[in-house]
Image: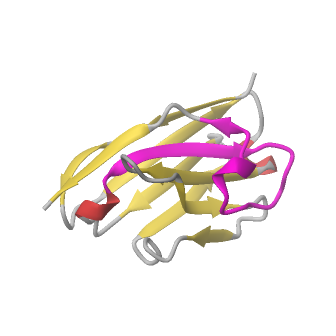
Amino acid sequence: QEQLVESGGGSVQAGGSLTLSCAASGYTARSYCMGWFRQAPGKERDRGASITTDGSTASADSVKARFTISRDNAKNTLFLQMNSLKPEDTAMYYCAARLGYRYCSSDYRQYNRWGQGTQVTVSS
């Protein structure tokens, strides 16, 4: 059974950095699109960044140049390096996979596997 387990969230001051990890099991992570989404209280779930099977990445304008998504194929693990964090980055961050699809979508409803989420809190 496919499973995604996130780790690496926490509390940090504005300007700081965090790295999120997502360990995939039950399938080969590089075979499908994967992404990081985030959801703040009262807001819709938005894509932070995603990566296709050929390694092409896309990210939201709000995090571009600050967040980097990457994948370690040997470890079957997805990462999100977050730099220059801002209070508005505070949210629950979710790892997601779009099993059956090589290419990604910015719409969270197109993803069919989700991790449990990890909280990121950025204080000013």
Give the farthest residue toward the top: 1
Asked whether 47 or 21 is in front, the reply is: 47
Asked if residue 91 is among those painted magenta in the image, a careful observer would answer: yes
Is residue 109 on the magenta stretch?
A: yes
Residue 35 is left or right of residue 98, and the answer is: left
Q: Quadrant of the C terminus?
A: bottom left
State the image quarter where residue 97 is shown: top right
Where is residue 24 drawn, in percent x and y? 64, 35
Q: Where is residue 113 in the image (x, y as percent from the top left)?
A: 69, 36
- Spot the residue most to the right: 100
21 vs 69: above or below? above
Q: Describe residue 27's horizontal placement relative to residue 88 as left or right.
A: right
From this viewpoint, is residue 5 visible? yes
Relative height, residue 99 to residue 53 (above, below): above
* Residue at image coords 49%, 77%: 61
Q: Residue furthest front?
A: 42
Number of disc labels: 0
Q: In the image, is 98 to the left or to the right of 39?
A: right
Residue at image coords 58%, 48%: 78
* Closest to the observer, 78 or 37: 37
Q: Quadrant of residue 75?
A: top right
- Colour treatment of the image: secondary structure
- Residue 62 % position (x, y): 43, 73
Q: Can residue 8 be spotted in the picture? A: no
**In the image, farthest residue toward the left:** 124
Q: Which quadrant would the N terminus be assigned to in this image?
A: top right
Task: From the top left corner, tell me how far across and down residue 26 is, in percent.
Answer: 74, 27
Q: Residue at x 32, y 53 (%)?
A: 18
Q: Residue at x 52, y 52 (%)?
A: 45
The magenta span reads 90-114
